[in-house]
Amino acid sequence: MAVALAMVTLAGLLLVALGWLGLVGRLPRNGFAGIRTPYTMRSDENWAATHRAAAPVLIFGGIAVVMAGLAFLPFSLAGKLGNGLVGGVTVALVVVLAADVLVAWQYGVRRAKTELGN
């Protein structure tokens, strides 16, 4: 179970990195990482505006998951927590990650459309 918790914690770090790259404009339009919708893939301007708007949401959610994961991970690795608790925390963090990504996607696209007027 500790491995799954560690993987979710790393996923949170990935969200922080993606959010930061989007915030500073260093996440190029690509088919692998980022908010890839027909709207964002239409132009570099749409891509940049969406990721700039979504960045704070991604960063905040990623940091929350990393902090919670790091709070439980040492105790899980030491065997001081039951598998049920670690599994529950892991599932809860996956739900937080999924919700964060969905909210960032909706918020980012909506803000970019408002900002760019399309």
Image (tube, grey):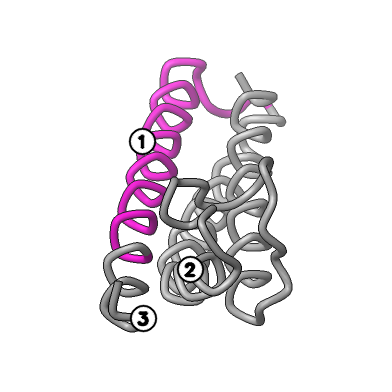
**Residue in the picture at 66% in, 42% down:** 31
Left or right of 104? Residue 63 is right
Q: What predominant SS class does the magenta segment belong to?
A: helix
The amino acid sitting under disc 3 is Leu
Residue 35 pos. (x, y %): 50, 51
Name the secondary structure under disc 2.
Answer: helix
Indicate whether residue 81 is drawn in magenta: yes
Name the mark on residue 69: none
C-alpha separation, residue under disc 1 versus residue under disc 2: 28 Å
**Which residue position is annotated with label 3?**
116
Residue 106 pos. (x, y %): 29, 56
Q: Nearer the viewer, residue 42 or 60?
A: 42
**Residue in the picture at 66% in, 54% down:** 13
Q: Nearer the viewer, residue 116 or 23?
A: 116
Name the mark on residue 46: 2
| Tag 3 near tag 2, CB within 8 Å | yes
Indicate whether residue 106 is drawn in magenta: yes
**Which residue position is annotated with label 1?**
95
- Labels 1, 3: front one: 3
Examine the image and state in which quarter residue 28 appears.
Answer: bottom right
Q: Quadrant of the C terminus?
A: bottom left
The amino acid sitting under disc 2 is Asn
